[in-house]
Image: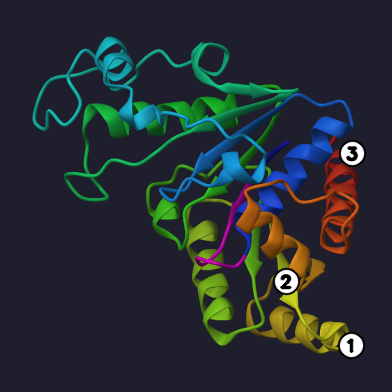
Amino acid sequence: MKIAITGKGGVGKTFISSVLARLFEKSGYKVIAVDADPNTTLACALGIDEEITPISKMNDLIEERTGAKPNSYGAVFKLNPKVDDIVDKFAYKKGNIYLLVMGTVEKGGSGCVCPASVLLRRLLQHLILKRDEVVILDMEAGIEHLGRKTTENVDLMIVVIEPSKKSLLTAKRIKKLANDIGVNNLAVIVNKIRNIEDKELIKNLIEREVGLPVIGFIPYDEEVLKSDFLGKPVDLNSKSAKEVEKIFNYILKLKQNQN
């Protein structure tokens, strides 16, 4: 199962990505957790204290695999570099979760073609198309990654929103761009619900305005904020994690139906 978690900034993508990764691991799966957000916080959410060097900063690796130095714009380099051993050699392993921190290319613009960007894009394609493990992508905020087509072959794209007009607008744009690149299996999770009685009203609004199914509601939870502040993973018995577990069970049934 290849799952991309997307949405605007601050809606809780990393929290949901980390809990899903831990639930899959708890159920016996090997999980590749990918921090594809330039604001790299997935390690902290998984309870990893060590500072992890992003792939985009591994200059020796980039030069070895592409044949060109990082940031060498206009240079000749391989467009199909070897990436199939990167998980085993460079991922941070915690239990049966393998964390890859992608990082970002800081020069040349978002659409640049440079050795680092080619390696990152090729690695994402390999993870989605070639790996047998569960892959969970904690994507960058917004919709720029959809323009790069890096998520076009995921099994499920989850759009995380909070009860706000801005979140709805972002979800609508994500749906359109996802459909444009052939991703049609999208669903919505609503996070930070303060009034649980409003669920049906919010669900109807999203399905009418955005045109996507809602597969879960997660309540506003001070425990999540506290865990984030302390740099610790959220307790899987917390009320918010229990709601993510319902979404996890939905995903398992979805995969069974696809098979």
The kind of secondary structure the magenta stretch mainly shows is: loop
Residue 205 in the image, given as x and y percentages of width and height: 72, 87
Single out the mark in the foreground, 3 or 2.
2
User: Label 3, label 2: how many angstroms apart (C-alpha)?
Assistant: 24 Å
Q: Which mark is residue 256?
A: 3
Residue 118 in the image, given as x and y percentages of width and height: 31, 30
Identify residue type, mark 3.
Answer: Gln
Dot placed on the residue nearer the N-terminal end, 1 or 3? 1
Do the numbered discs 1 and 3 sit on residues whose CB atoms are within 8 Å?
no
- Residue shown at 61% from the left, 52% from the top: 14
Single out the mark in the foreground, 1 or 3.
1
Disc 3 secondary structure class? helix
Identify residue type, mark 1.
Answer: Glu
Q: Which mark is residue 190?
A: 2
- Residue shown at 40% from the left, 12% from the top: 82
Magenta highlight range: 4-11
Tell me if residue 49 comes above or below residue 110 in the rendering.
Answer: above
Residue 245 visible at all: yes
- Residue shown at 67% from the left, 75% from the top: 211
Which residue, given by chain and number where applicable, does mark 1 sit on?
A: 197
**Quadrant (top left/top right/bottom left/bottom right) for the N terminus:** top right
Report whether 19 appears left or right of 84: right
Nearer to the camera, 83 or 178: 83
Residue 223 in the image, given as x and y percentages of width and height: 77, 63
Disc 1 secondary structure class? helix
Query: Residue 143 appears in which quarter of the rendering?
Result: bottom left
